[in-house]
Amino acid sequence: MRGISLEVGGHINDRLWQAYWDFIFVLSNFLLAILFGAAAGNVARGVPLDAQGNFSMAFFTDFNVRGHVGLLDWYTVSIAVLATVVLAAHGATYLTLKTEGPVHDRCEKYAKYLWISCIPLLVVILLESRFVRPDLPGRAWSNPFWWLGLIVTVVSIVALVSGLAGRRELRAFLGSNFLIIGLLATGAAAIFPVMLHSTLAPENSLTASAVAVSPSTLRLASFWWPVGFALAIFYFIFISRRYAGKVSVQRDTQVSTRALP
């Protein structure tokens, strides 16, 4: 429905038609952000892995974070809320770069409010993580990649804040991008080498060495992965150049002239 809304939302010059697909687009993006956050929360918290490496989960159980957990509990919901606010703030920051007029001014204000609201949410999750996974701080401090991710996060925050305060939109957007990268990097480095923690028994957890693919598979990936990565970079450069600059309401419209009365 998200893809359809992007394609057909502007094909008919009718406000009811357009408002419906705008609603579908917003709702689908909101649900995707919740889904991504809940998935990240499940990775950080762990799943009920048994000794054979199998697990199954209900949508939610008693909202407990240990034992036979469900997909949703107070910890995973907290991370889902943070992910939604972070992605909304990132989107607002991007729109300040790409729009002009009232939309630009509104997004500039929303970006500041949303990024500020991320601070208490992040503090709450850090405190919750200390209770849910007390083993994470020790792993994080001993992992150099965690410190690298922390440096990226700090520098990104400085760039983001200075960009928003000084209305340097490109700097703010770059800071927003690298802030998300830094948060993901610090989280990944903190849980490594455990790839999937077991909430039933720590010895059932899956580690990177235990779940690694065979050397022959890695050799094959070393051939196709660079090709795929190069295609992704080419597509990104093409899209960036094709849609460079700010969107103009007078120039850029999806409504076909054949649909106008």
Image: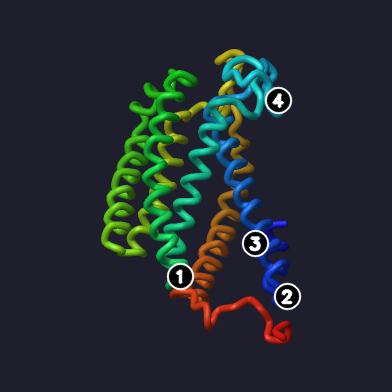
Quadrant location, the N terminus: bottom right
Q: CA distance from mark 3 to mark 4?
A: 34 Å
Secondary structure beneath dot 4 equals loop
Secondary structure beneath dot 2 equals loop
Q: Which comes before the other along the chain, label 3 or label 4?
A: 3
Question: Residue 44 vs residue 122: left or right?
Answer: right
Q: Which comes before the other along the chain, label 1 or label 3?
A: 3
Secondary structure beneath dot 1 equals loop
Quadrant in which residue 38 is drawn: top right
Q: Which comes before the other along the chain, label 2 or label 3?
A: 2
Quadrant location, the C terminus: bottom right
Q: CA distance from mark 2 to mark 1?
A: 23 Å
Q: Which residue is mark 4?
A: 57
The mark found on residue 99 in the picture is 1
Q: Amino acid at mark 1?
A: Thr
Secondary structure beneath dot 3 equals helix
Q: Which comes before the other along the chain, label 1 or label 4?
A: 4
Q: Quick one: 158 or 62, which is closer to the camera?
A: 62
